[in-house]
C-alpha cells in the first residue's frame, strides 16, 4: 500500500518552498496536479522530473479511482495545487476522502497558506476566524451565503478574483454594514499589498470591476454586539446589568462595556459587587 502526500507549495514566492516539500516531490512515483502546466514550471525550477497526473474538479471521479488503484498497488503519490495548500477549498479534498475510505495512508507536508498569511497581517482579531472561500456567482446562493455569516462574531476570510471585487465589496457593505476590512493582494509576490480600511472606503478605491489587479484575500471584521453610547457611568452600568441578565459573567460584562464606553472596568465591577451585596 502506497502513501498519498498532501504537499503545500508557494503562493507566489518560490523561495517559500520547503526542503521537505522538494524531497517529497522527488521521491513520489507520480504527482497529481490541478493544472499540470503550472506545476511543471515549479518542478522544472527545482529540477524534479516526475509523471504528472491532471486531477481537478471536472475529472475528480475518474482520475480519483485511477490514482487510488495505483496507491493500493504500492506506488506513492503527491498532490499539489496551483498555489498554497491543496485540499483546502480545492478538489483535492475528494481524493483525501477517497483514500480515507479505503484505508490508504495520507501524510501532510505543510506549506504556505493564503488564508493564514492574510489573517496574520490583517490587523484584525486572529483568535477566532472563519474561512468562507469564494462567494458563488449565482445571485441567490451568493446572498444566502452572506446572510448566513453576517451575524458571525468571528473574523471572516474570503477569496476573490479582481474582476469580481467591486461587486463583492458592494454586496458585503449591504449585508455587513461598514466594517473594517483588510484587502490582501498578491501575497508574497513582487507587488504584495495589504490595505487596511473599511468596506465603504474600499468600495471607493475600487469603483468598478476594471480597477483591481491581482488575486485578493479579504479579511473582514466579525459582527459586533450593538452597545448604546453612554454619557455617564450610571448609563454604562445599566448596560453591564443588561448583559449580566442575559447570562454574561460579571467580569466579562464589565470588560466589554468598559471597552465600548471608555469607563473604568474596575468602577463598573465595584458597582456590580456593591449592588449584589445589598
Image: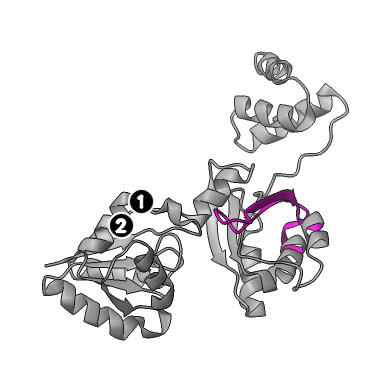
Q: Is residue 46 visible?
A: yes
Q: Which secondary structure, mark 1?
A: loop
**Residue 18 — which label?**
1
32 to the left or right of 125: left
> The N terminus lies in which quarter of the figure?
bottom left
Q: How far is disc 1 from disc 2 in space, using C-alphas?
A: 6 Å
Q: Residue at x 79, y 30 (%)?
A: 261
Give the color scheme: rainbow, by chain, secondary structure or one colour.
Answer: one colour
Q: Nearer the viewer, residue 17 or 262?
A: 17
**Residue with the most extreme right position:** 231
Going by the image, does 67 lie left or right of 213?
A: left
Residue placed under numbered mark 2 in the picture:
22
Secondary structure of the residue carrying numbered label 2: helix
Tally the numbered discs: 2
Classify 138 as above or below 253: below
Looking at the image, do the residues carrying marks 1 and 2 touch, with CB atoms under 8 Å apart?
Answer: yes
Residue 35 vs 182, above or below: the answer is below
Above or below — where is 76 with respect to 192?
A: below
Where residue 68 appears, as percent x and y from the top left, is 21, 76
Residue positioned 73% across, 27% down in the render? 258
Question: Do we see residue 107 in this rendering?
Answer: no
Pick the front one: 132 or 234: 132
The region drawn magenta spans 174-200
Residue 185 part of the magenta segment? yes
Amino acid at each position: 500500500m502506497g502513501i498519498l502526500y498532501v504537499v503545500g507549495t508557494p503562493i507566489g514566492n518560490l523561495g517559500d518552498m520547503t526542503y521537505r516539500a522538494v524531497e517529497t516531490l522527488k521521491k513520489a512515483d507520480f504527482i497529481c496536479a490541478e493544472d499540470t502546466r503550472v506545476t511543471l514550471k515549479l518542478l522544472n525550477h527545482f529540477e524534479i522530473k516526475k509523471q504528472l497526473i491532471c486531477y481537478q474538479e471536472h475529472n475528480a471521479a475518474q482520475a480519483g479511482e485511477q490514482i487510488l488503484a495505483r496507491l493500493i498497488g504500492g506506488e506513492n503519490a503527491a498532490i499539489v495545487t496551483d498555489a498554497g495548500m491543496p485540499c483546502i477549498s480545492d478538489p483535492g479534498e475528494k481524493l483525501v476522502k477517497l483514500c480515507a475510505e479505503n484505508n490508504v495512508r495520507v501524510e501532510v507536508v505543510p506549506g504556505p497558506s493564503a488564508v493564514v498569511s492574510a489573517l496574520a497581517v490583517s490587523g484584525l482579531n486572529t483568535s477566532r476566524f472563519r474561512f468562507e472561500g469564494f462567494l458563488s456567482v449565482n445571485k441567490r446562493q451568493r446572498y444566502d451565503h452572506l446572510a448566513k455569516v453576517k451575524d458571525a462574531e468571528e473574523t471572516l476570510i474570503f477569496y476573490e478574483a479582481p474582476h469580481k471585487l467591486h461587486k463583492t465589496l458592494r454586496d458585503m457593505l449591504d449585508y455587513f454594514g461598514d466594517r473594517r476590512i483588510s484587502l490582501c493582494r498578491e501575497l508574497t509576490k513582487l507587488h504584495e499589498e495589504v490595505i487596511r480600511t473599511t468596506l465603504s472606503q474600499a468600495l471607493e478605491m475600487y469603483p468598478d470591476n476594471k480597477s483591481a489587479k491581482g488575486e485578493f484575500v479579504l479579511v473582514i471584521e466579525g459582527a459586533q454586539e450593538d452597545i448604546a453610547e453612554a454619557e455617564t457611568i450610571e448609563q454604562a452600568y445599566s448596560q453591564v446589568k443588561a448583559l449580566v441578565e442575559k447570562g454574561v459573567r460579571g467580569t466579562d460584562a464589565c470588560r466589554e462595556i468598559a471597552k465600548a464606553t471608555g469607563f473604568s472596568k474596575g468602577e463598573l465591577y465595584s458597582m456590580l459587587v456593591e449592588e449584589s451585596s445589598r
